Image (spheres, rainbow, N blue to C red):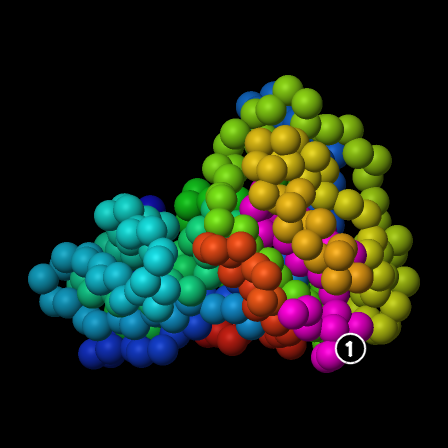
Amino acid sequence: MTSSVSASHSARPLKALYDVPAPAKLNLFLHITGRRPDGYHLLQSVFMLIDWCDTLHFELRTDGRITREDLQADEAAEPLPAEDLAVRAAKALQAACGTLLGVHIGLEKRIPSQAGMGGGSSDAASCLLALQRLWGVRLPPQELNALALSLGADVPFFLSGGHAWVEGIGEKITPLALPPARFVVLKPAAGLPTQGIFSAPGLKRDTETATIQGFAANAEGQPKSVDFQFGRNDLQPVAQEMCPQIGQSLDWLKSRHLEGRMTGSGSAVFAQMLHEADLPDVSGLPEGWKIRKCGNLEAHPLAGW
């Protein structure tokens, strides 16, 4: 895809960009409303950005190579595959823009993998935004969104700049205002591959279509009317069968008077904290589980890039 090259070079390349954030998301609800003939599932969800972030660093390479270094913030984290979404995003943008420049990516991974929090997709989106600056190139928004969707269904959301009502297979994104809120996010040691859940025979695929108005009376002007308990996660029953630790996580929250729900395809779960003092005692947390108090973001840290 090189048709836009003549219009896409916007500035001289930079030498480096450091401390580029890639925030995680929570699905406040996730409804499966149908399935396309090609097998892709149709969904409705509210994607909410939270302040649990990976951090990326970019150093210009003039030899055209794309390399990545894992700067593991969590020593217990699994090593990333050589062709993770960040590397794939960089190669896709390089090809789309026809640039001869390359990059060395340093990735501090904090968002748990196989959690349903979109960490890999967020890394990819931050790469697309940062590398346009680093290389001095610019894809038209429509082409950039198409490239993002080719990398994964969640990547366009992380390019959109804020919280969103998401439909289709993830490509229909409506900006949404949300009031500030605090959440407990709990990730058990076990993870779940997304594909296994979506292919499960018992997955509910016929949830009645909802509306933004049903979720928030006036999504743009009256965010205070948002119902954080709206709907459900249709993937949760299947995920709990495949991964008992999800049910154990929800029970752990319930025993501390917090009403939990799974995010995305799991295995992370979350619960809203109505008061700062609601953060539970974590002394009995099983080994390998991660818990964090998170706030939702006013906007994506890279909004406007």
Question: Percent position (x, y) of residue 234?
Answer: 72, 38
Q: Dot 1 corresponds to which residue?
A: 275
Q: Is residue 279 magenta?
A: yes
Q: Nearer the viewer, residue 79 or 58?
A: 79
Q: Is residue 260 magenta?
A: yes
Residue 45, above or below 69: above
Residue 277 occupies quadrant: bottom right
Q: Nearer the viewer, residue 212 or 276?
A: 276
Residue 205 occupies quadrant: top right
Tag count in the figure? 1
Question: Percent position (x, y) of residue 59?
Answer: 21, 72
Identify the residue at image location x=36%, y=78%: 19
Q: Is residue 138 visible?
A: no
Identify the residue at image location x=78%, y=77%: 275
Q: Nearer the viewer, residue 271 or 48?
A: 271
Q: Secondary structure at mark 1?
A: loop
Question: Percent position (x, y) of residue 63?
Answer: 9, 62
Q: Nearer the viewer, residue 222 or 117?
A: 117
Left or right: where does residue 85 sit relative to residue 223?
left
Residue type at tag 1: His
Question: Percent position (x, y) of residue 85?
Answer: 36, 50
Left or right: where does residue 198 sit relative to residue 46?
left
Residue 52, above or below 205: below
- What crowding class fits label 1: few (fewer than 14 Cα within 10 Å), some (14-19), or many (20 or more)? few
Identify the residue at image location x=27%, y=71%: 58
Residues in magenta? Answer: 259-281
Q: Is residue 256 visible?
A: yes
Q: Give the residue furthest to the front.
A: 284
Left or right: where does residue 284 sit relative to residue 45?
left
